[in-house]
Image (cartoon, rainbow, N blue to C red):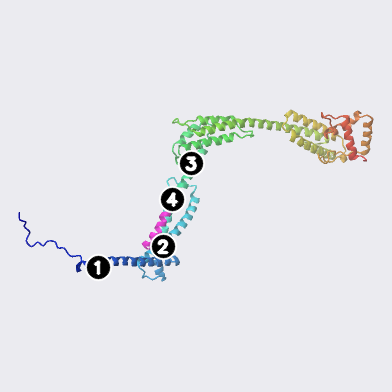
Amino acid sequence: MAIRYQSGFIGSQTVSRESEATALVDGLNTFARGFDTFAKAKGKKITEKTTQEAEKAARLDNLKSYQDGVDSGKLDATQSEFWISVYDNIKGQNAGAEFKTKKALAYNEWWAENVENDDLDGSLYSAWSSEFDSQYIDANKDQSSFFLKGLDGYIRATNQQLAGNYASSNGLKLKTKGKNNLIEALESVVGTDEVTTKIAELDVKTNLSRFLDKEEFNGAVIQAYKNKIARLALKGDPTADYDTALDLVDELISFKRTNGSKIVNGKSVEELNNLKQTLEMEEIQHQGLMKKVSDTVVVQDWYKQEERVLTKKAGFDFVTGVGEQDGLERANLAKDEYSKRVKAWMKINGDQPVEYQKAFLSELKTDLMNKYDDQDIQTLTMYNSRTNNFNIKREAAIISADIALHDQDSNDPRLMEEYGTIAKLNGYVDANGNVTPKTIGDLLADLDKLYGSN
């Protein structure tokens, strides 16, 4: 079949790659690409130079902004918009750094002034923050958009950081305050019939307790009980009540909310059981201390009684003030020696039974009564266990005569009567603690060295 073609149709023509037209097109394309590369490089160089000049100017001068420089005549108004954008953006960042510092300082002051206020929803902080920002923004409202862009970045970052800090600090404050308020409210009723009702009342989410989770609420209840227990279990205090303290531990361990859940669970049970064991041991120690305190009071009363008998016998009654001057001096010396000897003995024997201590006090009182009875005040000096235990001066002739008597008859009763008390008080006794003729002989020998002619 014959193929017909539309009249006037010109078919596709192939141009030789070596034609002048093709060469022209290729040349133009090559030039365009080269010019574009050149233009970009030139533009980049100009941009870098402009940026450097603007940044240098912004960092070296002390102007607030480009407009401030123009208004003051320190900058010309012919700079390009790009130069201005770089310059003012840096000035805005400088203002932002200043904002960051000033707001941080202002925040610290505001927090110190408002730390006691309960900002339950953060509105107090938001109001303060907005007011601070508005004052700063209003002071810069006439600046360029480039300046404000640099400033705004710092404002956003600063506010984000401060808001996070405040949320953390305020949350912790509200938690702590809620816990402390809860503890304080419960302490006054722990150990009474009101405690169950009070815990149920506070268990409903109140303004401050709502910041405590279940475990924190339980912890506050436990702490309130512990505080009350600690005030009751004061070892060595006459007002201590360990029985009630132990009852409170049991009450706390078994305590249940109105919904049936326990306040004490997990590790807290173990801790309270350990506390109970500690209290039980302390109670035994406390009872021992109280007995000792009671015994001490008895011994002290006995001491005062015996001391008065001694001083009256020495010649002066300190209660009534009756006695002569010589009696007063003699009584003071006797009283002083009684006190010193008792203190020295108590350091070693303070744990002895009460009756044993009382017996010593009475026996010592009697010995000192014998020692000071009818002694001339001129022969007496103050007793000192180390340097002056023989504080009654004796005549050498009398000592010599008594030594002769002892040599003649060591069992002469007068020697025991005269020197028995002194020998006993100064340790001239045998292995059984008794004064014997031999120990009196030893005493006389030492007295002769002290007062005699040797």
Residue at left offset 42%, top offset 53%: 159
**Magenta span includes 149:** yes
The amino acid type, in three-letter code, at marker 4 is Ala
Q: Is residue 154 left or right of residue 254?
A: left
The amino acid type, in three-letter code, at marker 1 is Gly
The amino acid type, in three-letter code, at marker 3 is Gly
| Residue 202 x, y percent position in the rendering | 47, 36
Q: Quadrant of residue 337?
A: top right
Q: Is residue 155 left or right of residue 16?
A: right
Report the residue marked by disc 1: 27
**Spatial separation of the CA atoms under disc 4 and disc 2:** 25 Å
Task: Return the disc, 2 or 1, that comes first in the chain's sequence.
Answer: 1
Report the residue marked by disc 2: 90
**Spatial separation of the CA atoms under disc 2 and disc 1:** 46 Å
What's the magenta region? 138-157
- Do callouts 4 and 2 mark residues in contact (Cβ within 8 Å)? no
- Do callouts 2 and 1 mark residues in contact (Cβ within 8 Å)? no
Please give the label number shown on residue 8. none
Report the residue marked by disc 3: 178
Task: Return the disc, 4 or 2, that comes first in the chain's sequence.
Answer: 2
Task: Return the disc, 3 or 1, that comes first in the chain's sequence.
Answer: 1
**Spatial separation of the CA atoms under disc 3 and disc 1:** 84 Å
Please tell me which residue lies in front, 93 or 357: 93
**Magenta span includes 141:** yes
The secondary element bearing badge 4 is classed as: helix
